[in-house]
Image: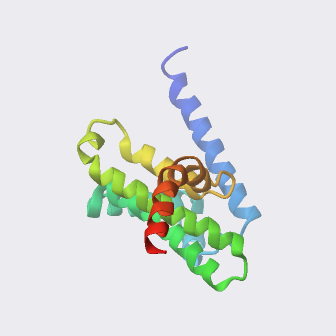
């Protein structure tokens, strides 16, 4: 394959990706209703997808500059779950309460283990990307990883001590 064909192939793939995101934006206009992007699209002639990517990249760089990868992964592990927890508190759905209480127990346990093993964290390549994936897996509604970790790891470790503590209190 001549080297001149590679950039064209890459550009075709990029153009297809832009078209896919643009199609997504047209199918779900309420999600992408920011008027500034539409104004930029009208005034420049470029798709608002480019400006969405640029804004996302700028925000990511800003967050990285403020606190680095740990800050970003902690934000992702906190902001969305906190929002859902606030919603669950006001909702009558007990299942949502269990999901988010379980998430916070697993999140806190993971944070303690991570702090205790801070010297190991530096040795693991791409640690914060792995952590980010793990945190999303914990709360993503498809996987509900926090419930699995609680049921299979934390509960068997903590339950015997809870029973002993309850006997001493009684």
Tell me which residue sits at (45%, 58%) in the image: 161
Picture coordinates of residue 23, whole percent (x, y): 72, 56
Tell me which residue sits at (59%, 77%) in the image: 35
Picture coordinates of residue 121, whole percent (x, y): 30, 43
| The residue positioned farthest toward the left in the image shown | 119
Does residue 4 appear in this view? yes
| The residue positioned farthest toward the top in the image shown | 1
On screen, residue 157 above or below 85:
above
Q: Quadrant of residue 88?
A: bottom right
Instruction: State the residue in front, 111 or 70.
Output: 111
On screen, residue 92 above or below 129:
below
Q: Quadrant of residue 123?
A: top left
Left or right placement of residue 114 versus residue 40 in this view? left
Instruction: State the residue in front, 32 or 95.
Output: 95
Picture coordinates of residue 97, whole percent (x, y): 63, 73
Left or right placement of residue 148 versus residue 61 in this view? right
Left or right placement of residue 147 versus residue 128 in this view? right
Does residue 51 appear in this view? no
Instruction: State the residue in front, 102 or 57.
Output: 102
Left or right placement of residue 69 versus residue 164 in this view? left
The quadrant in which the N terminus is found is top right
Tell me which residue sits at (37%, 39%) in the image: 126
| The residue positioned farthest toward the bottom in the image shown | 90
On screen, residue 140 above or below 34:
above
Total labels drawn: 0
Picture coordinates of residue 135, whole percent (x, y): 50, 54
Q: How is the image coloured?
A: rainbow
């Amino acid at each position: 394959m001549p080297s001149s064909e590679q950039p064209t192939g890459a550009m075709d793939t990029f153009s297809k990706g832009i078209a896919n995101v643009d199609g997504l934006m047209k199918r779900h206009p309420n999600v992408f209703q920011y008027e500034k992007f539409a104004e930029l699209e009208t005034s420049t002639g470029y798709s608002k997808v480019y400006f969405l990517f640029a804004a996302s990249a700028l925000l990511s760089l800003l967050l990285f500059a403020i606190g680095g990868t740990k800050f970003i992964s902690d934000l992702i592990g906190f902001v969305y779950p906190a929002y859902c927890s606030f919603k669950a508190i006001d909702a009558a759905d007990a299942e949502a309460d269990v999901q988010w209480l379980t998430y916070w127990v697993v999140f806190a346990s993971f944070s303690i283990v991570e702090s205790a093993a801070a010297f190991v964290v530096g040795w693991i390549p791409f640690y914060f990307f792995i952590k980010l994936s793990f945190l999303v897996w914990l709360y993503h509604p498809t996987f509900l990883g926090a419930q699995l970790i609680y049921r299979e790891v934390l509960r068997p470790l903590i339950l015997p001590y809870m029973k002993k503590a309850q006997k001493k209190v009684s």
